[in-house]
Image (cartoon, grey):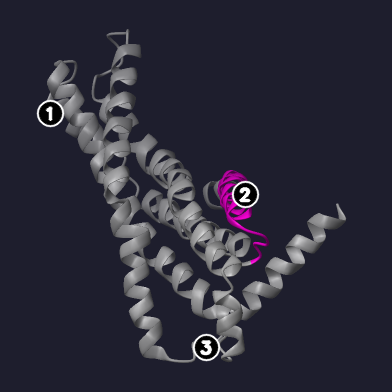
Amino acid sequence: MINGFITVGNYAMLMHKVFSLPQKGKIFWNQLIAEINNLGIESLGIVTFISAFMGAVVSIQTAYNIDSPLIPMSMVGFTVRQSIILEFSPTVISLILAGKVGSRIASEIGTMRVTEQIDALEIMGVNSANFLIFPKIVASILINPVLIIFSMWVGILGGWLAMVASGMVSTNDYVEGMRIDFVGYTIFYALTKTVFFAFIISSVSGFFGYFTKGGALEVGQSSTKAVVYSSVLIILFNLVLTQLLLT
């Protein structure tokens, strides 16, 4: 329990150091562009792959379970849309990013800690927490919603391709289902969750990397902790945000 309070306190103090005005704006912007590429653009491949198959699986399962003639096949498109937008894209993709991006951030900063590069920055008078972690947090908050929007589109497209390929649902029925009772607020809800999840992934991973002690083994342990704690917090905040935004 005491260690938990100490960890939360260290995290709060680190975030206080992180959220200060960057010392050189030009350097920050260069780092931000690089982090958007490293944390976002390089994740497009896995996001595309998972989203497409996720949409295909949801559509096939829904079509398979519609065994009553009273239920129109357009419900497949409706179910895929709601499932992808409300839960699968914002939450599942964020969990995937927690593993891919979170481990990268923790291992990168952890390696800099154990090789004393962070100590060198501190000696030169640089706010190392702001210099290393702040661009990653801003980049994640900016690029993750873009990834989630892209994931939604690919997921719905994957569901349609699965229905067309299998012949289970016609294109007209699928598109009709997608358009049934669409509420734009669901997109706002999904992107709000995504912003919170992006902050959790980048800040928690940065925290564990920043406080790494030891050598290569400890860097691996910090990376594992970053993924585990980020995933747990995403699941907890998913429940809290759903309760706040949908009730």
Q: How far separated are the C-alphas under marks 2 and 1?
A: 51 Å
**Mark 3 closeness class: few <14, some 14–19, many ≥20 residues within 10 Å:** few
Residue that badge 3 annotates: 21
Assess whether mark 3 and mark 2 are in contact (beta carbons under 8 angstroms): no
Place of residue 32 in the rendered image (x, y in percent of width and height, measured from the top left) = 37, 75
Q: Label the magenta part by its dominant secondary structure.
A: helix
Circle number at residue 62: none
| SS category of the residue bearing label 2 | helix
Q: How far separated are the C-alphas under marks 2 and 3?
A: 31 Å
Is residue 192 visible to us here?
yes
| SS category of the residue bearing label 1 | helix
Residue type, numbered disc 2: Gln
Residue that badge 1 annotates: 172
**Residue at 39% in and 35% down:** 83
| SS category of the residue bearing label 3 | loop
Is residue 19 visible to us here?
no
Place of residue 19 in the rendered image (x, y in percent of width and height, measured from the top left) = 57, 79
Residue type, numbered disc 3: Leu
Residue that badge 2 annotates: 221
